[in-house]
Amino acid sequence: MLVAVPWARTRALQVAAVFLLLPSVESDAADLARGHAIANRWCSECHVTGPGQQRGSDNVPTFSEINKSEKFDAARLSTFLSAPQHSRMPDLSLTRAEIADLAAYIKSQGQ
C-alpha cells in the first residue's frame, strides 16, 4: 500500500505559504474613518465634506457633487491629489494610503 502523506504534507505547506505571502485584503482596504478625518482636517475649509457641515466655499464642489460627477473615479482623484494642478488647491502631500482613504470617503458621500 502506497502512502501519499509526504506529498500531501508538502502540498499543504505550499498552499499555506502562498496564503501567508499574499497581502491581506483588509489591510489594503481603504479606511473611511481615516478618510473622514483627513477630509475634516484638510478639506473642510473649502469643501463641504459631509452632510453635517454648514459652510464651505461657494467656488468649489461639495464631496457629494464630486462623488456624483461623471468624471469621478478613484484613479483620477488619486492622480489629482498626488499633484494638484488647480491653483487654489494646496499640495497636501498625502501618502498613497491617505489618498485611497480620502477617495473612499468621497465615494461614500451622497449615496
Image (tube, rainbow, N blue to C red):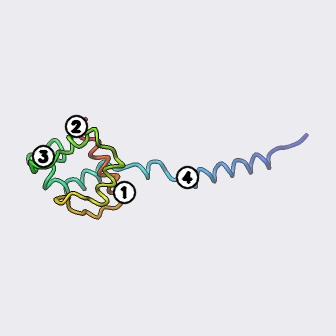
How far is the residue under mark 4 from the one under mark 1? 18 Å
Residue underneath mark 1: 97
**Left or right relative to 81: residue 45:** left
How far is the residue under mark 1 from the one under mark 2? 22 Å
Question: Element type at marker 3?
Answer: loop
Residue underneath mark 2: 110
Single out the residue that lies furthest toward the right.
1
x%, y% of residue 27? 44, 52
Q: Mark 4: few, some, or many residues within 10 Å (few <14, many ≥20)? A: few
Residue type marked 3: Gln
Residue type marked 4: Leu
Question: Element type at marker 4?
Answer: loop
Report the quarter where the C terminus lies: top left
Q: Earlier in the sequence, mark 3 or mark 2?
A: 3
Between 4 and 43, the one nearer to me in the picture:
43
Q: Residue at x 8, y 48 (%)?
A: 58
Residue underneath mark 4: 22
Q: Mark 2: few, some, or many residues within 10 Å (few <14, many ≥20)? A: some
Q: Mark 1: few, some, or many residues within 10 Å (few <14, many ≥20)? A: some
